[in-house]
Amino acid sequence: RILTEEDNSFPYIRRLAIVRPFGVSSAASFSQTFSDWTDFPPCNVADHSGDENDVEIDIFLSFSRTYEEDPFAASSVKSIIDKFHAERSSTGSSWSKCFRNIYAIEANIPAGDDVYLPNQAKKNMMWVNGPNR
């Protein structure tokens, strides 16, 4: 049977997590992707009123290594998070209004294993050790 919103057993989604992974090679351009959201927000900010039916969405900035070993990545993420909180508290429209909160997480992948070489996918079966395999 098809569930509808009127059906009391309809599984409402109340919270959602979005993970934005990035690595050493993309750390320099990572903050630009959020700047692009100024012109192309990930939600309709005007319709995102925060009423009880809205899904609460958290965004996690996931660095492949550790922030301690890469100060540039740490600085990039800090600037994104600082901008998020500054814009979230402002009265204007901003991509930050699409999310409940933002977090920095790290995967702690050793440098020797943190390799993404899609051009070697057919030559090296270990080119990625994850769900893409």
Image (tube, rainbow, N blue to C red):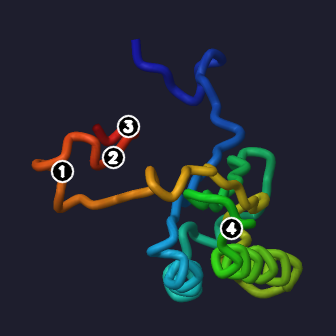
Q: Tell me residue 48's x, y (percent).
A: 69, 64
Q: Residues within 10 Å of mark 1 (few under 14, many from 20)?
A: few
Q: Earlier in the sequence, mark 2 or mark 4?
A: 4
- Amino acid type of the residue tagged 1 in the rendering: Ala
Report the disc number at residue 69.
4
**Outermost residue toward the right in this view:** 89
On screen, residue 31 versus residue 71, left or right, reads left
The residue where tag 1 is placed is: 121
Report the disc number at residue 128.
2
Q: Tell me residue 125's x, y (percent).
A: 21, 40
Q: Earlier in the sequence, mark 1 or mark 4?
A: 4
Image marks 1 and 3: residues in contact by CB distance under 8 Å: no
Q: Secondary structure at mark 4?
A: loop
Give me the residue at 50% from left, 83% from top: 29
Q: Residues within 10 Å of mark 3 (few under 14, many from 20)?
A: few
**What quarter of the picture does the C terminus occupy?**
top left
Report the disc number at residue 10.
none
Q: Secondary structure at mark 1?
A: loop
**Outermost residue toward the top in this view:** 1
The residue where tag 3 is placed is: 131
Image marks 1 and 2: residues in contact by CB distance under 8 Å: yes
User: Compared to 93, does 100 lie above or below?
Assistant: above
Residue 81, quarter of picture: bottom right
